[in-house]
Amino acid sequence: MTQENDIVLMKGNEAIAHAAIRCGCDGYFGYPITPQSEILETLALEKPWETTGMVVLQAESEVASINMIYGGGGAGKRVMTSSSSPGVALMQEGIAYMAGAEIPGLIVNVQRGGPGLGTIQPSQGDYFQATRGGGNGDYYILVLAPSSVQEMADFVDLSFELAFKYRIPAMILSDGVVGQVMEKVVLPPFKPRRTEEEIERECPWASTGRKGGRPINVITSLELMPEAMEKHNLHLQEKYNLIRENEVRYEEWQTEDADYLIIAFGSAARIAQKAIGDMRSQGLRVGLLRPITLWPFPTKRICELSEQVKGILSFEINAGQMVEDVRLAVEGRTPVAHYGKMGGIVPTPDELIQALKSNFQLKD
Amino acid sequence: MDESILSPENIVYKKPTLMNDNHMHYCPGCSHGVVHKLVAEVIEEMGMTEKAVGVSPVGCSVFAYKYIDIDWQEAAHGRAPAIATAIKRLWPDRLVFTYQGDGDLACIGTAETIHALNRGENITIIFINNAIYGMTGGQMAPTTLMGMKTATCPYGRQADLHGYPLKITEIAAQLEGTCYVTRQSVHSVAAIRKAKKAIRTAFENSMNHRGSSLVEIVSTCSSGWKLSPVQANQWMEENMFKFYELGDLKNTL
């Protein structure tokens, strides 16, 4: 039950930290980088090791952080790290190893503009990196895109649940807007960390010491026999198909009668909502589809809506990345365009309205 | 063979039960087999079979998990100390150790090695230093001696081209977080006994939460050095021990 002090005004980054403590997270390992350092700072201030027993460690690098997640997740614990775009780029080796070794864990990316050191201002430029695996080999990770501080809090537990259900790394792909904005949030209720017995039962594969003389557990992504490696890859692909079937999440807003559809995720979806409100008052019937899971992508629903609308605008704070997935879903049934800005500039609702009108030749 | 001599009272030596019968991929004369046996023996003698979690590296010992029947995690190249850090912090009553070669520990994983040791993580690092990259076919390592020939310094290691061999164990001894830093070898029966004692001390430190322990084993790589097993042992004694002096570098206990 929600208590009075569970309703608070805080930043998205702070909400992630509080949600982690509350949802039975066993450990956080991270390295400071703007615009997400409040996550580690909040955890350090809250001292969860004295209350829930959650481990908090400032690592020597993002490379070390992600390998700590590998180690902790491989030992059956609910562990997480967070970073921003350049730091997440550094983590890609470890994420690929986790995917190969089927290790659950949570990576939070509060995106900033790139490429390279880029800027500390918000961006959604890591869509490709997040949804295409990002490291080497054939793999995907689960990607959840929060568009509010509330979802920053809610997606922590959801990510862990999905990550352990499928033994897959999960990512919360946020951005500098959602990380830094302050909003009202209802923090999730406290859930105890899992006991040793619960971990042994739920993660019989984990390397925790071979209690009772059971066969040994080895966490590895290595297999030199091509036949065995192919078999492992086929198993991974089967798992990805299962996730595609069962875990697609999205939200629709005013799509019932829409003539035009905007597809946007994260903070861009919030901007789109304002723009759609304004366009509706001008008599333009525009709706929003907000993918909540970026992988798996709501391909089927977009395909259905493409039969209904006269045009689709993929609105992203980047040069046009998700638009590729939209085009693959639409397969030419209706015109698809992209609008976005780069370099840390967040587009305004008016700019989005102008972009939609000019792309689909609508009069002002 | 006279089978009657196999009665239990006549057995003076046997391999530890934690060592399975899988065929090892190590070359004849390689030190890895002996060190694996010592690790297995110590875990067994300490009664830690159900609590031990090893972290294997990238390098010749990447498959350590195939030979010692405990739980393992196989690390990305150089990252074993980060992985061990998390396992030990999340399971404080477990015996957590890494087993790494010189390229893994002293080159690509230098940052993870130094920082795990400096934080005083309650883990043990077993460091096999054979001054060469064995698995990839004998390339220069961070610990390759001056003048030593490898596939990537075929005319011998030169300071102006390749820099100097890294004594990372000496660095480790300077760190506040380490409680026990020692350099051993397994070239003779006496050395093997000392090395075993060192591994036992290190594992006990880890279980007693006294800080980080580093056990370097100066090792042979007869294939990489292009010497017979006997020659490799001799070469190690004559050359390696001069630069990498055996003995305890630090013991705060």
Image (tube, grey):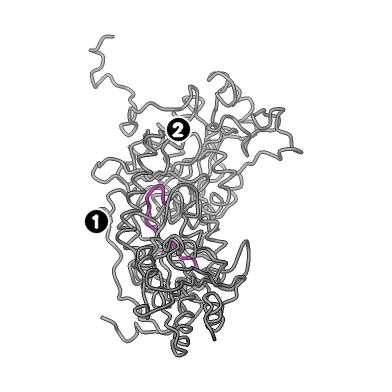
- The kind of secondary structure element at disc 2 is helix
> Which residue type carries mark 1?
Glu
- The kind of secondary structure element at disc 1 is helix
Residue A359 image-quadrant placement: bottom right
Q: Can marks 1 and 2 be said to lie on one chain?
A: no
Circle on res. B35? 2
B205 magenta-colored: no
From this viewpoint, which residue is outermost toward the right? Answer: B160
Position of residue B103 in the picture relative to residue A334 (left or right): right
The percent position of residue B7, horizontal first and vertical second, equals 23, 18
Circle on res. A56? none
Along the viewing direction, whichever of A290 and B123 lies nearer the viewer: A290
Is residue A53 at all visible to an observer of this figure?
no
Region of the chain picked out in magenta, as a range? A98-109
The percent position of residue B109, horizontal first and vertical second, equals 55, 47
**Which mark's residue is nearer the viewer, 1 or 2?**
1
From this viewpoint, which residue is outermost toward the top? Answer: B1
Is residue B186 at all visible to an observer of this figure?
yes
The residue lying at 42 percent from left, 54 percent from top is A140
Circle on res. A197? 1
> Which residue type carries mark 2?
Val
Instruction: State which chain disc 1 sits on.
Output: A
Question: Considering only vertical position in the picture, is A10 above or below A315?
Answer: below
